[in-house]
Image: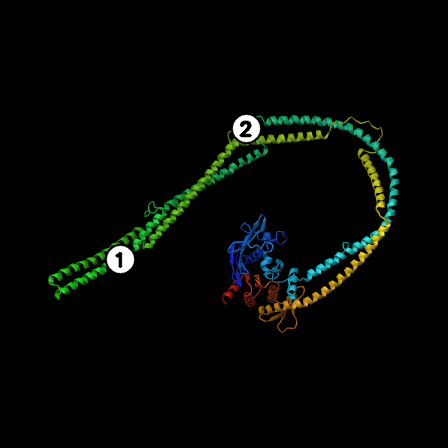
Amino acid sequence: MKIIRMKATFGGLDHRELELKEGLNIIEAPNEGGKSTWSAFLRAMFYGINTKERDKQGYIAEKNRYQPWNGGAMEGVVELEWKGEQITLRRGPKGNTPFGKFEAVYTDTGEPVGFLTADNVGETLIGAPREVFERSAFVGQGGAAIDGAPALEARIAALASSGEEDVSYSQVERRLRDWLNRRKHNKTGFIPKLEEELAGNDEIAGRQAKAFRLAQEARREMDKLQTEHKRLQAERDAHLARAMAARRRRWEEAQSALEAAKEQVDAMEGELNRYGTPPDKATLQKAQGELNQLNALHTSRKQAEERLEQAKAQEGEATAAAVDPLFPDMTPDQAWEQASEDAQAAGEVPRCGGLYAGGAVALVLAAGSLVLAFTGVLPALWMGGAACGVLAVAGVGLFVSAALRKKRAGALAAELLERYEAEDPQAILTRASAYREACVVAGQAAKQREEAQQALDALLAQDENTRKALLELVHPFAPTVKDTFGVSAAISRALQLEERLATAQVKLEGAEKLAASLPRPEPVAADPGVEPRFDPAGTAARLNAAEGELSRLRSGLAMAQGELNTLGDPAELELRQEEAREELERRQTEHAALETALKALDAAHAGLQARFSPALNHLAGDYLAKLTGGKYDKVSLTRQFEALAEEAGGLQPRRALALSQGTADQLYLAVRLAACKLVLPQEEPCPLVLDDALANFDDSRMALALECLEELGEERQILLFTCHSRERAWQEGR
């Protein structure tokens, strides 16, 4: 795959374009110049933006970090070549989702690429999911180190062992452990459930005895509670009779308050609607806002008047500048046509060669006639003299005519150049061009004056319409108002009355609700003649408690009896026990077999590691030898993806922490390049993106790295973003 062109509105990139070539592309930009942004943009075009990601302390989510600085929408275009086809990818906003809209078309025809979607475009074109791409071919700023992401580990291990990307130790192990957990995992596995079932059946007999005992106790407690329940009922009736009398008093008081509230509302409505009914509160508040806007409108009108005067002055200056006495009342095209004709005339050289040639021929013939006369060819000497004279006069006349024509042309050219105050014919055209430009400027100034006049007229109309609308609004309830001051006072008074009326209506509503909540009391019930031992709440609480206790006892008795009825036949229980024991034995056998399979899989995986590690280590060692000029030529990678380097001829590999920073960077770059080649598809290899990956390299290390990248660029496209000029200087000096 090769990227041809990118265009982005993304973070600090404002409609920026970047064209790329095959092989190694060195893109130089200063810090904060968009290097990392271009890298992030390319990744987002292939894999989208994670909209579920949220800002954290010290970290800004991509959807917020790369919002365009110009305030526009996040969007981009990538043109690329893949499998002989040129494809254009486009992403843009979809609602509030950045990069939610996706489109893939064939560049030449514009036809959609049916097999590419927003979700699969990266994995289809690059040949790997996002996390594998980021940990192999995408080396972001400070990201030269490689880690053991599950997807990358699985893919590297599968490719190194069998060449099949779908074969994954971790997947098989996970599946076996899932099966193992289904049989024995806490309380949810088959085995714990069967063991629990067997243990539960042993409890049934004990439950039967307990249920019988609880039923006997419930019957005894119910007999004792019945007497107390009857006494509490009588005390409740006594409290009820006294409460009915108090309720009647409250009802009569509520009726009186309701009548007073109605009278107050009627009085307020009469005052508010003395001349007419005002509009609703929202309309009046809106009108107040329009009054406030009139002041702002006055300021805007003053500004518009100033802009109009400025535009008129500019129009006058431009119009005066567009006047040229050489082109009176001419359009720019007419002036150009005249200037073109005059320039041609001023530069034209008259053609006099024919006249000069004719004069010469006539003089030659005149001389010939004399020769003929003297040699006796002609019958008389006078005939030769006459012919000579005529021909000589004709020849001289032609020469004179040519000289006159040339003189007239020169005089015309001088006159035209003097008229235009020009040194050459081209200056005539230059003056016509200046006239054309002055006319264009004058036209633009006239348009700006018209626009300024229209803006002022609109503001004046808006002011007039607003004042008129406000007067029309208040006249129905304030007919004497004649200006905006009266409008303001009328609206304020109406709003105050509305507020007072609203308060009175709220009071009335409260009185109505209170009256409605107190229905007309029934006749007072007879007092049973029992003196309550407790207050009403205490009596009610104890009565409810007694009823609740009776209900609980009845329920407990019913539950105990129901449990005795539902415990089942003992013979059936024993049959269930036997079936559960057989099922438990079978599941335990399966569990043992799965444990054996997991042990065999672990052993196979250990062998896989022994086969996989040399492949990656050998390839990384080759790259490290190129990057270090042969100083280090061996690499070993632990299962935790910690890289070790060994010097040529050395005996002991060295950890990255024991190396210099420059050598450690070379080591991790070598591992990255090896992982990229091993993990990613070699058919249509995706570009390698390096963001300041060589920033910590000195000049010699940089030169070795660039030589290695140029060699690698024969296989895949490489994008090297850098803030230094040395990489470009090295490439240009090659």
Q: Which quarter of the rendered picture does the N terminus lie within?
A: bottom right
Query: Identity of the amino acid at label 1?
Result: Arg
| Helix, strand or loop at mark 1 | loop
Between residues 507 and 125, which one lies in front from this camera angle? 125
Query: Identity of the amino acid at label 2?
Result: Pro
Q: Position of residue 496 (x, y in %)?
A: 60, 31
Instruction: Say left or right for 506 vs 484.
Output: right
Q: Residues within 10 Å of mark 2 (few under 14, many from 20)?
A: some
Visible residue check, residue 576: yes
Quadrant of residue 149 within the rendered picture: bottom right
Instruction: Say left or right for 42 vs 439.
Output: right
Residue at the spot x=88%, y=42% of the render?
A: 216
Residue at the spot x=64%, y=31% of the render?
A: 503
Between residues 345 and 268, which one lies in front from this camera angle? 345
Q: Position of residue 506 (x, y in %)?
A: 65, 31
Name the mark on residue 351: 1
Q: Position of residue 533 (x, y in %)?
A: 84, 33
Residue found at the far bottom of this picture: 649
Q: Which residue is mark 2?
A: 476
